[in-house]
Image (cartoon, rainbow, N blue to C red):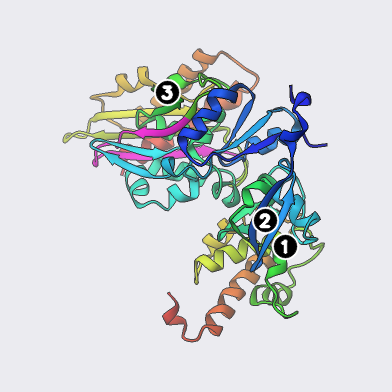
Amino acid sequence: MNQEIPQEELADLEISFTLNGCQVHVSIKPWETALDIIRNKFQLTGAKEGCGIGECGACTIVMDGKAVNGCLILAAQLDGRTIETVEGLSSNGAMNYLQKAFLDKGVVQCGFCTPGMLMSAKALLDECDRPSKGRITNALSGNLCRCAGYVQIIDAVEEAVAIKLKDAGDPAENR
Amino acid sequence: MRIKFKYLRPHSLDECLAVLAAHGDESAILAGGTDLMISLRSGSRIPRYVLDVSRLAEIRSVEQHAELIKIGAILTYSELIAHPLIVKTFPALSAAMSCVGSLQIRNVGTLGGNIANSSPAADSIPPMMIHDAQVMIQRANSVRIEKLERLIVGAYSNTLEPDELITWIILKPAESVCKQTYRRIARRRSLSIARVNAAICGKLDASGLIADVKISVGSVAPAPLRIKKVEDSLIGLKPEPKFIQETGELIARHIVDLVGTRHSTEYKRPAIAGLVVKCLEDVFID
């Protein structure tokens, strides 16, 4: 049945969305995933395809403030949304506080999971100034690290929380 | 090589139902996509149309109608877990939804999708069953309301027709004196599928006897079960530790009788009993 789909039904779709703060307009195939086009159309190759079925979190991007698996979202679903990828964290070549904390705590071994970990952590810290350790592990529990660096990763997020509070001034006002 | 399809995003429920009326048998409905995207990737589903219902504003709310609460089928787990009325009224369901997949999955996955997928191990089904869940299903010119237990007829199998869409889930809140619980056994806390899961809701009368109890167990049969026969037999009895232990074993035996002995029975029988005992303790002890 699928083989008989007329060509005109399979035409490209035009979508617009905000990608790392820039309004973008792009032509996509209906069956492409968000991860496909972020990597292939925009050459933002931080988000990785690990499992392709939403289990490893290496493809994590942030959509309208929520961490999502780029492999489980159709590119067409990005239309009108606000998307953040790991490439949007730094500004003018300077790392943001999360990236600094990851470097400082020696998080990265092979690095494959790191962009996804950073984006899960970013979504958490954008939503909550002082997450408990339980909340941090919950937010990162959809991201697998096969180098077994979870301790350092959680330490790094805790450090990032501290940096963020310090940068924001009086921590007591940040609740 | 990915399978090819046309992507449609109807702007209203009416438009969506019209598309289903015309092309339902060659369409796949995309709500959260956490199951569908995997099927499209593996090629186990080859629809001509993928119908994105995730933005239908008409079915994205929680509404209270007299004694019932209506939940829009395309609300995500994350939205529901953050909804004060849901958390307050349905603590067992909230706990179950917190167990689904990972945060990334919960941020897109929907309650309607969990029902439509009809997995025997679905986290949300047993805690909906203890609230006598009904499912509102719409097609172009008609609506039907089906009991959740009747809608799901087997593993990944339900009575939904190709032109139908799950639009609302209707739950009956328990009396405020009732206690509710949800527990599961799984390999790890995140991203694992329940081996056994159970939801129980109940209350004691003034003299400490069981006045009401609803028990639902999942992952043990082709579809999650309400154990009504056992529920009825517990009314008026005193939930002492020995009795709770025996009830756990009774339910495990009841389920084994129902589904027959399988390769997993040796593991599942004590696992069901143990899990049910813990749930009964949550509800009736302390």
Query: Relative to residue A106, is residue B281 drawn left or right?
Result: left
Real-space Cα separation, disc 3 to disc 1, in angstroms:
48 Å
Q: Position of residue B80 (x, y in %)?
A: 43, 47
Q: Position of residue B258 (x, y in %)?
A: 50, 14
- On whether residue A67 falls in the magenta region, the answer is no
Which contiguous range is marked in magenta? Answer: B166-186
Q: Position of residue A35 (x, y in %)?
A: 73, 52
Q: Residue at x 36, y 46 (%)?
A: B86
Above-or-below relation of B142 to B174:
above
Residue B169 can be seen in this image: yes
Q: Are marks 3 and 1 on the same chain?
A: no
The residue carrying mark 1 is A115
Real-space Cα separation, disc 1 to disc 2, in angstroms:
8 Å
* Chain ID of residue with mark 3: B
- Indicate the amino acid at tag 2: Thr
Residue B156 can be seen in this image: no
Res. A60 mark: 2
**Label 3: how many residues lie within 10 Å, few (<14), some (14-19) or many (20+)?**
few
Q: Where on the picture, by quarter, is residue A108?
A: bottom right
